[in-house]
Amino acid sequence: MLGCINLAINKARTARLFNKRTDALGCMAHPGAELYGIEESNRGDVTLIGGGLPVLCDGAVIGAIGTSAGTVAQDVAITKRDWPPLNPA
């Protein structure tokens, strides 16, 4: 599924842009919520589907990872599993 590649990249980009998990941002972006409409920012590259995770080391964000191709729950579980020594935001 080639579309999953761009989706994973955009999840990582979103997590890094806002230093938040994409599933958490998605919850804050529902109609009436404080970040409603945020997906229209940054040229529309913001992805609010779980699977994007900022990566921290010693309290500083050093990057982000994004996964796609499974269910949202699977994508979230994979990002958390693959980075256990670091502190997810």
Image (cartoon, grey):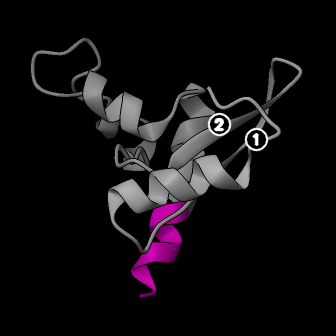
Secondary structure of residue under mark 1: strand
Q: How many marks?
A: 2
Q: Which residue is mark 2?
A: 54
Percent position (x, y) of residue 28? 29, 22
Q: Which mark is residue 63?
A: 1
Residue at 50% over, 34% down: 21
- Residue interval drawn in magenta: 1-8
N-terminal of the pair, mark 1 or mark 2, is: 2
Q: Where does residue 42 sit, x and y in percent of width and height?
A: 46, 39
- Seen in the picture, residue 43 relative to 26 is either above or below; the reply is below
- Placement of the C terminus among the 4 image quadrants: top right
- Secondary structure under badge 2? strand
Looking at the image, residue 17 sits to the left or right of residue 2; the answer is: right
**C-alpha separation, residue under disc 1 versus residue under disc 2:** 6 Å
Pointers 1 and 2 in contact (C-beta within 8 Å):
yes
Let me know if residue 76 is in the magenta part: no
Relative to residue 35, is residue 42 depicted above or below?
Answer: below
